[in-house]
Image (cartoon, helix red, strand yellow):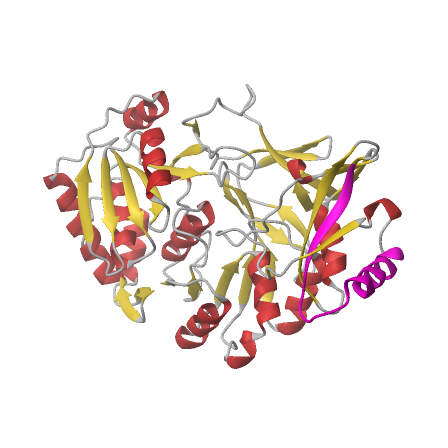
Amino acid sequence: MLLNNSKHLDFLFSIFNENFEKDAIIWKDQNYTYGWLLERIHFWCQLIESKNILSGTTVALDGDFSPNSIALLLALAEKSCIIMPVLYTLNSIQKKAYYEIAQIDWIFSINEHDEIQTKCIAKTVTHPLYLTLKEQGHPGLIIFSSGTSGKPKAILHNLLHLIRKPETKRPSAKMLNFLLFDHMGGVDTLLKTLSSGWTVVTIQERSPDAICMAIETHQVEILPVSPTFLNLLLLSQIHQNYDLSSLKVIAYGTEPMPESTLFKVKSLFPDVKLFQTYGLSELGVFPVKSKSSDSLWVKIEGDGIEYRIIDGILHTKTPSSMLGYLNEASPFTEDGWFNTGDAVEMDGEYLKILGRKSEIINVGGEKVYPIEIESIIQEMNNVGSVTVYGEKNPIMGNVLCTKVHLLCPESNKEFLKRLKLYCKDKLQPYKIPVRVIFSEESLQYSERFKKARQHQ
């Protein structure tokens, strides 16, 4: 048995040993067993020791999900290092800025062939949050926020708080790791898959065609994706070219789901269980339970998780919360509450996420949530994608605008007439867009497959 004297990941390595001959990772159509993963973690632990990379050292992993990057991440965690995953496609200027903020000491670069090069920068680590982790002898994880509402924030977690033992033994399954290498959701998917003794199916391209091909080829059962990606899948109709009958679960999160998209996905995959996930880079991913497959209402579950609603905004306390920001002041109250910035509705013990408070559009004193209007317009025939935003107005504060991509050519005048008529009985007058921009771009999303919103 390997790594029996584990310092941090003993329960994880025990699961790996139990599943020694089973597939842990599928990468570029090659299978890697849990036995291989254990041996590779052992190899990287020895290399880390040989390079005198000590507890508390800050290490950047520049790559994507691959056999060696996964093994190295776990080896660095076992050696109590502080790890910052960096997507290899990020531009060099942004990477350098991240390295400076995080006071990175070592860089491990993983290329497309899963080959690794190391580089020592020899930074002096001075941030007090790092010193706290080092005193505890615990590994850390650095995740950068997307920066959609300003400069990206460097978020530091105690990595041990994110690695959870499964409450019950789960049947074997294959989960596709759709979310990105440097994204909290991507890390959570990886850790959840491995701690369950499942198989993680990695991908190199995140297009509807590539995802459907991976599902068919590897008989993927669990697909965690964003609502924006699901809409792209619906629009592409590429699913008709593949056998997706292996799918049992679609988990959606990272942004609010338009109700119209949820109903379309449920209609397309009637035998697949759909459930919503909820999490933030600062808080990790919460255990939540959807009311049903066709419902956007969720119940927050999990030991030690508390929440409250103040002025319609969700506030939480959770054991998986970050230690703090490396480049910003702490956002926590003195008694440990975190303002998520997410507007919610309550129905007994269930919540519905309406959207970020920063996305709310004030129209003549009335609050408008873009997702509500987008969901209605998305129902219309010939609408491919739609983004609702506010435009400053001296009288109303803001007026509602929408950017629409049409699937087929149509007279602008005719579409505007259809839109007004369609929305008339479904939306209050102030929620009906007064300006429509017709976009040739069918893809209105970020590199993280989230709706690209912008207040004008």
407 drawn magenta: yes
Which residues lie in the magenta part? 398-425
37 drawn magenta: no
The vertical placement of 440 against 279, above or below, is below
Question: Could you tell me if residue 270 is visible in this image?
Answer: no
Coordinates of residue 87 in the picture (x, y in percent): 36, 49
Left or right of residue 434, residue 23 in this image: left
Give the residue drawn at x 74%, y 42%. Answer: 346
Q: Which of 339/80 is in front?
A: 339
Check the picture and name the quadrant holding the C terminus: top right
Coordinates of residue 190 in the picture (x, y in percent): 39, 54
Question: Could you tell me if residue 73 is visible in this image?
Answer: yes
Give the residue drawn at x 33%, y 26%. Answer: 130
Left or right of residue 424, residue 178 in this image: left
Q: Which of 274/449 is in front?
A: 449
Q: Residue furthest top?
A: 334
Among the 4 quarters of the image, the one containing residue 455 = top right
Coordinates of residue 278 in the picture (x, y in percent): 57, 47
Query: How many tags in the picture?
Result: 0
The vertical placement of 202 against 452, above or below, is below
